Image: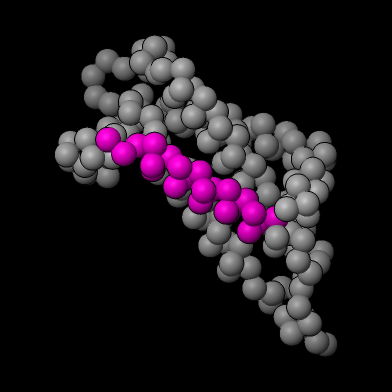
Amino acid sequence: MKQIIHTLIRVIQTRSYTLLLILTSLVFYGLFVGIPVLTTEGYNSVSLQLSIYRPQDFVTMGILALLMGLNITLIVYFMRNRKKQCSVSSSTAGGTAASASGILAGIASTAACSSCLAPLFALFGLGFGSVLFVLQYRWYFFAISLIVILASIIFTTRNINRQCNDHTKIVT
């Protein structure tokens, strides 16, 4: 755990990665607000959408946006720095899978926000019954999504810390 926190601090201390964290967090927050605006038919605007949200929706979206921004920032850091540490043939499938699952969890975590969920399900062609089911258990979906995002962050920080194995280096 200490190593994970040290890695997070090391990445965030760099000005460019701090800026990337802020920008990606804002983008995800904007997506959490913007997707329902764009996918809902009829009169819907950002101001109307914001008036629908409850205080816990703002907190939930803020936490998820920050974690998703951190996840993306760590992925970018890992991708940029792995070339310095590893050969081209080194495997990053574990890190990529963890990162992809974290991003998918962020999308699924919109279940905690009832006004985000219906348009998102409509986008995927799921019926109103599916929306009601997920809304009934939305905090479970949020908890699972949070766990998956945190796991993705942990696995990505472990990949950042791990050096290449001898068998993955190209021998010339």
Which image quarter: residue 128? top left
Relative horizontal placement of residue 75, taking residue 129 as reference (left or right): right
Q: Residue at the location (51% across, 43% down)?
A: 146
Q: Main secondary structure of the magenta part?
A: helix
Q: Residue at the location (55% across, 28% down)?
A: 62
Q: Is residue 11 magenta?
A: no
Which image quarter: residue 120? top left
Coloring applied to the structure:
one colour
> Visible in this render: residue 103?
no
Relative horizontal placement of residue 125, taking residue 60 as reference (left or right): left
Coordinates of residue 116 in the picture (x, y in percent): 35, 30
Which image quarter: residue 111? top left
Q: Residue at the location (29% across, 34% down)?
A: 135
Q: Residue at the location (64% across, 54% down)?
A: 154
Q: Nearer the viewer, residue 150 or 38?
A: 150
Placement of 64 over or under 159, stated as above or below: above
Relative horizontal placement of residue 52, taking residue 93 as reference (left or right): left
Q: Which residues are magenta?
A: 136-157
> Visible in this render: residue 60?
yes
Coordinates of residue 123 in the picture (x, y in percent): 28, 39
Q: Nearer the viewer, residue 164 or 87?
A: 164
Relative horizontal placement of residue 52, taking residue 105 as reference (left or right): left
Placement of 156 over or under 70, stated as above or below: below
Q: Nearer the viewer, residue 22 or 88?
A: 22
Count of numbered marks? 0
Coordinates of residue 108 in the picture (x, y in percent): 40, 44
Q: Is residue 148 magenta?
A: yes
Could you tell me which quadrant the C terminus lies in?
bottom right
Coordinates of residue 130 in the picture (x, y in percent): 21, 42
